[in-house]
Amino acid sequence: MSNSKAFQDYYPEELSHCYGCGRLNEHGYQLKSTWDGDESVASFTPQPYHIAIPGYVYGGLIASLIDCHGTGTASAAAYRAAGRAMDTLPPLRFVTAALQVEYLRPTPLEIRGKVQEIKGRKVVVSATVTANGEVCARGQVVAVQMPEKMMPAAT
């Protein structure tokens, strides 16, 4: 991985409480995504309480990881496309407009994302979840830039 700081580490405190990727949510997954060339990558180790049945990860966990990885990648891609550093203002943050997930096989996890399209306020990210080198789930996140009314007031 090329970055030592994850995309989510740039989120301001007010936007860092997400269950999937919020660094300030002590009970959440705290997913960390970085660039690996033109792809984004994150790893996640499921805990025993993330199971659906013994030996199988809960499907909602996979969907939320694809979702958070996709919106984090959208944010990083928007900064790249604008030629901006991720710590510059105003923040470019995204929320999910659509999420599609296909479950292919049982899963220990690495998540990779690839930017498919950047168009105005919309970024489309495809993602795969792999286990032991095999694709276990794939998804697509349509992320839209967070509306200003959802942003914290500037201090």
Image (cartoon, grey):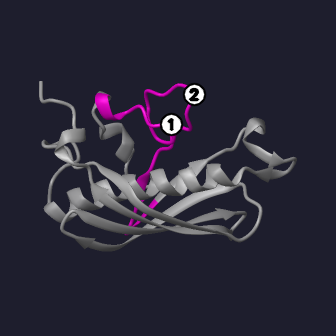
Image height of 14 relative to 39, above or below: above
Residue count near mark 2 (Cα–Cα under 10 Å), binned few <14, some 14–19, many ≥20? few
Spatial distance from mark 2 to mark 1, Cα to Cα?
7 Å
The residue sitting at 38% across, 42% down in the picture is 8
Can the viewer see residue 2? Answer: no
Residue reaching furthest to the bottom: 116
Image height of 34 relative to 36, above or below: above
Total marks drawn?
2
Q: Residue 30, percent across and down?
A: 51, 37
The residue sitting at 55% across, 51% down in the picture is 65
List the residue tagged with mark 1. Answer: 19
Examine the residues drawn in magenta and state their main secondary structure.
Answer: loop
Say if mark 2 contacts mark 1, CB within 8 Å: yes
List the residue tagged with mark 2. Answer: 27
Q: Is residue 77 left or right of residue 62?
A: left
> Mark 1 belongs to which amino acid?
Tyr
Q: Secondary structure at mark 2?
A: loop
